[in-house]
Amino acid sequence: MHFSDLTKSFGFFLLTTVALLSPAVSSPKVLFIHGEQYYGSEKTIPVFAKQLSEKFGYEITVLTSPKGNRALPNLSTLEEADLPVLYIRLRVAPIKV
């Protein structure tokens, strides 16, 4: 299976999932959290998120893991998301005390 086939499959899965949310929510909130150093998510995820927002009217938030460390970004918006999409590798979640 080629990378483009995987991308198309993931896109179809994501759009189908979000489409199922549409009747229940007027404008579904999709949260993208990405952070890895090998696969170029810093380029692809914002473009994909913009397409979802412009073509389908979804409310999109994109969080990027800081470069140079393994910490995830602030996850406070996760509670408000109807659909979280994680594209991360080797990241550490913050610990709440």
Image: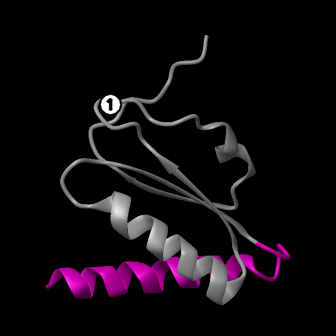
Identify residue for label 1.
Answer: 70
Whether residue 12 appears in magenta in the rendering, the answer is: yes
| Side (left or right) of 44 relative to 18 | left
| Side (left or right) of 57 relative to 71 | right
Front residue (pair 62, 86): 62
Front residue (pair 92, 48): 48
Magenta span of residues: 1-27
Q: Which amino acid does label 1 sit on?
A: Arg
Whether residue 97 appears in magenta in the rendering, the answer is: no
- Number of callouts in the render? 1
Rendered image quadrant of residue 44:
bottom left
Where in the figure is residue 81, as x and y percent of width and height?
69, 55
Q: What element carries label 1?
A: loop
Where in the figure is residue 62, as x and y percent of width and height?
55, 56
Residue 93 in the image: above or below residue 37: above
Q: Residue at x 23, y 85 (%)?
A: 4
Where in the figure is residue 8, as x and y percent of width and height?
34, 87
